[in-house]
Image: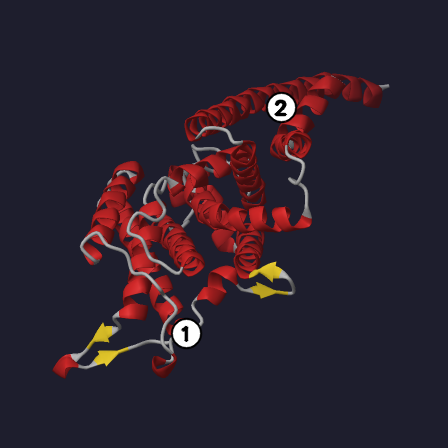
Amino acid sequence: MSRNYLIYMYLLKARTFIALLIVIGFFSVMVPNFLTPSNLLIMTQHVAITGLLAIGMTLVILTGGIDLSVGAVAGICGMVAGALLTSGVPLWGGNVLFLNVPEVILTVAVFGCLLGLVNGTVITRLGVAPFICTLGMMYVARGAALLFNDGGTYANLVGMAPLGNTGFATLGSGTFLGVYIPIWLMLAFLLFGLYLTRKTPLGRYIYAAGGNESAARLAGVPIVKVKVFVYAFSGLCAALVGLIIASQLQTAHPMTGNMFEMDAIGATVLGGTALAGGRGRVSGSIIGAFVIVFLADGMVMMGVSDFWQMVIKGLVIVTAVVIDQFQQKLQSKVVMLRRHEHKQAMPQAEGSLLR
């Protein structure tokens, strides 16, 4: 087999990391303080938002699905957190129950899971296409977020000490060992995603469902349970993003998360996950999130227009898909070459045995 083919394959497989190095190199020259430790830490905190969504999106796309609702789910989850912190839970007799911050986080996380569970159930039980189902959920969640407070925001989410619900800001802006909490959350979910996809039967089922659903079903893979799980997990990731943003801003806005789904899909595609399903890695999606966010933040620091930022990000995503298609064609050619070399080697081996 030609050595050039192998070199091309290795370069294509490492394309996301190479793209990240190019982005860092370019902006480190164009922006003097781009590589300062404080700026890198802030940008990595931004990566955590896209990274969390990309982890959930990767599992969904691995099964051959798509989740367009993650941005809207993040928005409504932020609004639910704002309502719980400022208005509490109305009870009978005019009483109001105020939850502490851990209880608010847990409640909103469960709510996000339930929204994802609805997506998974409608897709698997009613046979609705993932694109249509999650598009509908996007509109429902966004509209519900706007209805939540008549289109208004929940401001000053600092809580009140007598009610025991202070400290919400720690989730989005607090640090541990000098690193922001959202970054630790992204790392924790990354490790979970790696363990899930590499070491567990569920991970193998996820790849099987996206690789060949009919064959996986005949092999006994619980397709329905697998798909419901990945959409519920994506909803959980979106809920955490909504909580983090509301915590950082100390305000819950109904339009939070607008277009976040595009960044999550873009990071996943850049990371090498095939939109057809069955192929991809969670770690690649995180590197893709670094590329998307570092590119966006670098353009902001250079003063590039918002309109041009959208154009450039779109071109980067399309280019990633084109390169992925090229990689698949090259990989198929490599497989054919290996088979051809193997067939040529067989008669020679048989001749040597006869001699």
Few, some or many residues within 10 Å of mark 1 (<14, 14–19, 20+)? some
Q: As displayed, is residue 107 above or below residue 330?
A: below
Q: Quadrant of residue 113?
A: bottom left
What quarter of the picture does the C terminus occupy? top right
Q: Quadrant location of the N terminus? A: top right
Secondary structure beneath dot 1 equals loop
First of labels 2, 1 by sequence position: 1
Decide which of 18, 250 is in the foreground and name it: 250
Local packing at callout 2 (Cα closer than 10 Å; few below 14, some 14-19, many 20+) is few
Depicted 280 relative to depicted 125: above or below:
above
Dividing the picture into quadrants, the one containing residue 92 is bottom left
Name the residue tied to disc 1. 166
Q: Is residue 321 above or below residue 214?
A: above
Q: Give percent across and percent down for residue 248.
A: 45, 58
Q: Which residue is mark 2?
A: 335
Q: Is 16 left, or right, of 216 in this rendering?
A: right
Q: Residue at x 62, y 47 (%)?
A: 39
